[in-house]
Amino acid sequence: MGLFFGYLGGLFIRFIQESGRVTMLFGQTVLLIFRPPFDIRGMLDQMEEIGVRSIPVVIITAAFTGMVLALQSFTGFKRFHAETLVGTVVALSVTRELGPVLTGLMVSGRVGSSMAAELGTMRVTEQIDALFTLATNPIKYLIVPRFLASLIMVPILVVFADIIGIMGGFFVSVKLLGANPTIYIRRTWDYLELNDIYSGLLKACVFGMIMATISCYQGFYTEGGAEGVGKSTTKAVVLSSLLILISNYFITALLF
Amino acid sequence: MVGNASVKIEVANLHKSFGSNHVLRGIDLEVNKGESMVVIGGSGAGKSVLIKCIIGLVRPDAGSVRIDGQEITSLGEKSLNEVRKKFGMLFQAGALFDSLSVWENVGFGLKQHTDLGNEEIKAIAVEKLRLLGLKHVEDRMPAELSGGMRKRVSLARAIAMEPEILLYDEPTTGLDPIMADAINDLILQMREKLRVTSIAITHDMVSAYKVADRIAMLYEGKIVEVGIPQQIRESNNAIVQQFIQGKAEGPIMVR
């Protein structure tokens, strides 16, 4: 029994320690954003990697989510003859919820893992030490560009996801379920408020920061060779995804 | 207190633990200006930790490290970076940035700390590479280089900013004997051409005898003997004798 509580206590202490270290890294990163020199080139490279190369994944995710949403809500609404509201449901769900969350999760899987693996490899092959010896701050050089690029590109990806998701819903409703396109579009526009899109984009900014901070943290403090890099990569994806889902609830509740 | 003017690096009573592992247990070491010091010792004796403390990569638990009389263990990040500009370090496996080409690696410090343009940086990089006997490699990526070439590129990166102090982490480990000797020659050349002070850590005695002005033996977190190569060779200390002759039996336990 004592052993059990000891284990539990140990876990709790580690949780607090890690949270503290992540918060410190986040703080240092934010401060270093404003310290010259500004590495525009490095940031553009990361924006390409994080944003442009994620477009196909995000488009496929959003399209099928919008499509399945139309199918499911049609099935439900048909039971009380409200089929014309499918467009509204698809638009609200995608912009407020599914666009940002699914984009955040897909980007964590695609980009977060590679950030952790890359920084982790740099740690275990002493490249991060080499940066120190060349009088260069590795947080400024490696983490700041990734952080800023995520903060900018994840919301842009979410705009893509919103548009494609709504189009997916439209396609299924009109082409497969025989909805009237004019009414569908009007129902989408009439009930969609700018506020819905803004709240989705705010979530996207937060998710981008979470993904970049957690993934860079895991990579930057990797220990133990190739095995350590593997562990960091896994942790980066799992923790980013969990934190995205948890913070999603709280942001929604706050804006409710 | 500013120490003796000819002392470049002064380490006193240095302690460092990682958890329950007490790695450095009171290191005292002085390296004079222009001198080539070689620290020998077994794997896990704390050699790497020692040079990482000297360049400020690892913060010691107690003791002092002075560079040109300036205490560095208590410095903040900014002043420490100024001190680090006096250093160049050759890492064991090179630690080249694998996302950058060879010349970008060599010119990294210049890019970060000077206003030179890319063309000038590349010209300097090519010149440093030539000094180390490497031609036409500047546009390659680190992954395309052999082990010996990687070490030389890494050395070119270390000397690109014209440091006063060079640190070598196991410069000959993992190389064939001929390439190892070529690296030893380069270390000697660096001292003569660039007049640098250097510390090399190694367990390769051939290399130690060749490049050292003085040799220090590190054992169980302490320096057990310091002297010119001749003195080390004739040492009465059983630990030193066992190590330099490379015997499995003796006071040093094989773990």
Image (spheres, coloured by chain):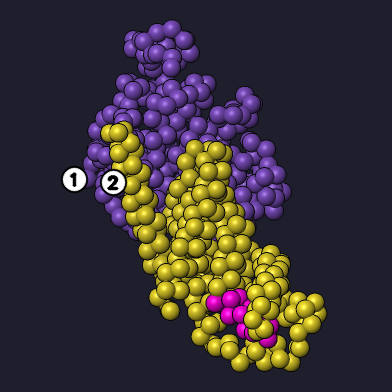
Chain colours: A yellow, B purple
| Camera-side residue of A1 and B248 | A1
For mark 1, what is the residue?
B1
Q: Position of residue A6 (x, y in %)?
A: 30, 37
Locate residue B42: give its quadrant. top left
Secondary structure beneath disc 1?
loop
Q: Between tags 1 and 2, which lies in front? A: 2
* Amino acid of disc 2: Thr
Secondary structure beneath disc 2?
loop
Q: Which residues are magenta?
A: A83-96
Q: Residue at x 29, y 52 (%)?
A: B75
Q: Quick one: label 2, few (<14), some, or many (20+) residues within 10 Å?
A: many
Q: How many marks are shown on the rendered structure?
A: 2
Residue lying at the far left in this picture: please name it: B1
Q: Position of residue B100 (x, y in %)?
A: 62, 54
Q: Position of residue B39 (x, y in %)?
A: 41, 28
Q: Residue at x 32, y 26 (%)?
A: B221
Looking at the picture, does residue A84 appear above or below residue A249? below
Magenta segment: does it hold A94?
A: yes
Q: Quadrant of the C terminus of chain A?
A: bottom left
Q: Residue at x 72, y 76 (%)?
A: A168
**Disc 2: which chain?**
B
Left or right: A16 in relation to A122: left
For mark 2, what is the residue?
B73
Q: Main secondary structure of the magenta part?
A: helix
**Disc 1: which chain?**
B
Left or right: A150 in relation to A250: right
Looking at the picture, does residue A241 appear above or below residue B96? below
* Amino acid of disc 1: Met
Task: Say if labels 1 and 2 share a chain.
Answer: yes
What is the spatial separation of the Cα atoms under label 1 and label 2, in whole angstroms?
Answer: 15 Å
